[in-house]
Image (tube, coloured by chain):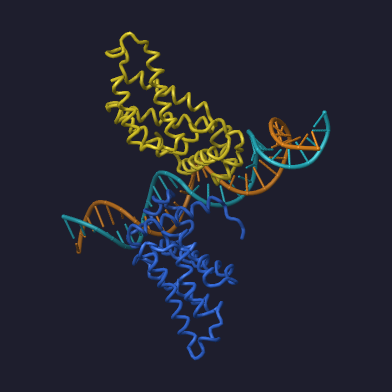
Chain colours: A blue, B yellow, C orange, D cyan
Amino acid sequence: MAKVDRRIAKSQVAIKNAVTELMSEKSFDDITIQDIADRADVNRGTIYLHYTDKYDLLDKMIEEHIENLRELCQSASEMTFQEGNYVWYEYFERNYLFFSTMLASKGAPYFRSRFLDLVIQEFKAEVDITVEKNNGLNEVVILQFFGSAVVGSVEWWFKNGMPLSARVMAEQTGALLDRNLE
Amino acid sequence: MAKVDRRIAKSQVAIKNAVTELMSEKSFDDITIQDIADRADVNRGTIYLHYTDKYDLLDKMIEEHIENLRELCQSASEMTFQEGNYVWYEYFERNYLFFSTMLASKGAPYFRSRFLDLVIQEFKAEVDITVEKNNGLNEVVILQFFGSAVVGSVEWWFKNGMPLSARVMAEQTGALLDRNLE
DNA sequence: CGCAATTCGTTGATTACTGAACAAATCAAT
DNA sequence: ATTGATTTGTTCAGTAATCAACGAATTGCG
């Protein structure tokens, strides 16, 4: 990865953080480019240097997080579900504001489906569905079933103010997955 | 005040915060320009764009805080010592890391004297020392006496991890000043 | 509806910052 | 003292961000 100019990195971080903050305060539709520029302490034109409009900006934010989660799966491919889940939940905690506004608010339903797609995709790659316990069951059904379970659990966690620690969430949902898929 | 380019403002804030952070971790003498640049996430040359060397940088940081405190005195000139002190202590809290490293560590003894100078100067401007209670006492002695008292109290507060709230500190030291000077 | 006020997306000229390089100065440690 | 390594302060060409301005498109309100 050719290292990016630190001015670019800083501007983009500021802009993305601004969007996340603003989305936790009001609907995405009500956020103007000027709002984002003000919050990020960046000239309005700077935003257009990197993104075509606010939808493109939100898309890139989503894709970036999805990609990060995918890479976490790579490095966690040798772990149990309990261990691997913990890596995910740690990432959720680090990016608390983003995920909670994306999942717990009505703002961006697109993200949820994008997130579910990723989970199912990774399950398909990591798990040999056809074996053992699950003979006789349709693979597509299994994937959809447990994918929805994972996403729903994360959703519940954020919507309820993260009442359990990341560690506990990872252990419990991990145990359920290990029991059924491994 | 002609508004400064936001790039300048951001760079300088990052640089100053970096110095404050680093001073809380190691002696000022051990801090290199490169350290500051790394911590501030700024090119080394950018620092030289604004400051001649790290001593100039520290000086400007000190002067800026002294100047801010002086301006707070302006706006607090109609208040009692209790009220006015609270404005100061709020400022101390907001700039916790700077003041605690400047006062509670051995790093910058210069700041203490600069701080004391300011307090005495403001006392001289705000208080009619010669009146009432203090007839027969030398003005210079009174100023030095209560100036040292104020600075020493703040020093104690930071060195002991701010065991009392800003509100309480302001009320108590304010009461002592009101009783003696007003 | 019609009008005013925002917001948008883009432009051009200017400025600040970047990264890389350099010689000189300072430091460490034998 | 003589090395070798680090840090310093400066230079330069290139790039990103700035601010101000613009007409066009949207929005909101009377």
At a point 37% along the width and 37% down the height, the residue shown is: B164
Q: B28 or A160, which lies in front?
A: A160
Q: A173 or B101, which lies in front?
A: A173
Outermost residue, top side: B136
Would you place residue B126 above or below residue B165 in this image? Answer: above
Q: Which of the image's four quarters has the N terminus of chain B?
A: top left
Q: A75 or B66, which lies in front?
A: A75
Q: Residue D19, position in %: x, y?
A: 42, 44
At a point 49% along the width and 91% down the height, the residue shown is: A136
Q: Quadrant of residue B174?
A: top left
Would you place residue A167 above or below residue B86 in this image? Answer: below
Q: Which of the image's four quarters has the C terminus of chain B?
A: top left
Q: Residue D30, position in %: x, y?
A: 16, 55
Q: Quadrant of residue A128?
A: bottom right
At a point 42% along the width and 73% down the height, the residue shown is: A113
Q: Residue D17, position in %: x, y?
A: 48, 49
User: For this view, does C24 lie left or right of residue A131?
Assistant: right
Q: D25 or A113, which lies in front?
A: A113
Q: How many labels, in total?
A: 0
Q: Quadrant of residue C2?
A: bottom left
Would you place residue B135 above or below residue A77 in this image? Answer: above
Would you place residue B100 above or below residue A39 in this image? Answer: above
At a point 48% along the width and 69% down the height, the residue shown is: A171
